[in-house]
Amino acid sequence: MRRYGLLIFFALLIVYLSFPTKNYYWDGLSFAQDIEDGNVGPWYLHPNHLLYTPLGQQLWLAANAAGLNLRALTVLQILSMVTGAATAAVLFCIFLELGTSGYVASCMALVFAFSAAWWKFATDANSYVASTFFLTLCVWLLVRKPRSTALTLGIVLSAAMLLHQLAALFFPAAVLALWTRGKDESLGHRLKEIGMFTLAAGIPTVGLYVLVFYIRNDLFTVGKLLRWVVEHSQDASFSFSLPRNIWVSTLSSIRLVLGGNLRMVLEQRSPVSIVAGAALIVSLVLLITRLVQAPPKSLTPMREEVRRLLPVLVVWCGTYAVFLVFWLPRNTFYRLFYLPGLILLCTPFLSAPKSKYNRLALAVSALFLLNFGFHIYPQTKIEANPNLLIAAEMSSIWQPGDVVYGDVLNSDNKAIRYFNPQVQWKEVWGRAYTSQIETSFKEAGTVWFDSVAFAEFSHRDAELQSWLGTHGRVGETYEFPVGGHVVGFVRLEERK
């Protein structure tokens, strides 16, 4: 039966490879840009995801050495696809270890794989999917027979934490799992197992963080190290508005499984989405009919394996859920770290045998059709990402060697920059320095500037105003509406 795990892996990998997203996560674009630039920029060794970009760089170099000639973004997407499909296959194996039938295990693995947020990020460049794969692998090692050693478990958790530090919130659940699986052992043996696991997970993780910080900083202090470890963007912080946060968390949890953008679907008028919508209606009608014909039975007796794992799953999901009530509850993608646990929590409610009604399979079909037709497929089109349209438009205007000054605080610029590798992109941090612009005129001749940033800077920067009056002038401008704001670029010309 376990060989079907490989079938699930390859089937899902084909699905993921067939529909890569074009609505890119902006962090992924930053990772890919740093990899291709070959520099140790702010995202290369970032404490939030310490080894993700170095791993992506090595995979990108290996792919190009093999003659594949892939861009870094594509390599990172493939990494997500492989680990995303592998996570579903491992989840299938966990369900089998818990005593469920192959039918139930397959259906629940597909429910996970076709959940809206997982499916989207499994086709995008991000560190969450690969990290969650190692967390799920850790759960499988905890429940499988024969038992895996605490040393192996610790190393696997360390890999998850080094890909993204939020994986550390799984630690309490792992300790509880080690404690409960050793219920027939002595107290000393259980403590020894937990201690070995803690050291195996902690030494590589903490050691590498300390080493990276030591290399990057002249002055080493514990305080500076800790501040670096918890570094985050300026717009990210804890929030203690509890009623609002609980409501936002609830909506975020729903979006974790169910997705869709009706406005985008209507704008695209894609026949694929129309067919998926029609098939969804048929699936729902059949599902409702069969639920009426044969209502689900009451809970079946809970198997010992499930009973033992249930507290671990509650701690796993509860730890993340409580933390994310206070830390950026709107960010659905952070909830990917405990999505496998949520799926496993359904085990006590699932009957083992397959019936002629196939209600579970119909539910999987409905989930697939909903998320594919109204969430995933529309995002595979370039129209789903206005920045790609802008990048394509500017690509026909910018010439190789042109210099473009882009506001680093504008995430729209990341896609425009990445898909215009022929220009020299210079980052602007809150101000335009006229000396840099003059140097660019001498070296490149043609200079462009983020039009929104330039308008802001020239309004409040007296030096820039003076320079425009005597040495430069504004030339042609291209601006594009994106949502409720404008993205554009203006050409600067030097007065002769």
Image: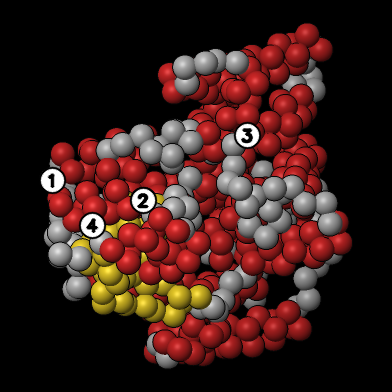
The numbered mark, 3 or 2, whose residue comes first in the sequence reads: 3
Specify the label residue 198 is tagged with.
none
Rendering coords of residue 42 (x, y %): 43, 39
Q: CA distance from mark 1 to mark 4?
A: 30 Å
Q: Which residue is mark 1?
A: 67
User: Which of the two discs, 1 and 2, labels the residue nearer the N terminus?
Assistant: 1
Q: Earlier in the sequence, mark 1 or mark 4?
A: 1
Q: Amino acid at mark 3?
A: Val
Q: Residues within 10 Å of mark 2 (few under 14, many from 20)?
A: some
Which numbered tag is attached to residue 433? 2
Vertically, is 219 above or below 491? Answer: above
Mark 4 highlights which residue? Answer: 403
Whether the residues at callouts 1 and 2 have beta carbons within 8 Å, the answer is: no
Residue 480 figure quarter? bottom left
Which label sits in the foreground, 1 or 2?
A: 2
- Examine the rendered structure and indicate whether residue 166 appears above or below residue 125: above
Amino acid on which the number 1 mark rests in the picture: Gly
* Residue receiving disc 3: 230
Tell me which numbered mark, 3 or 1, is placed earlier along the sequence. 1
SS type, badge 3: loop
Earlier in the chain: of badge 4 and badge 2, it is 4
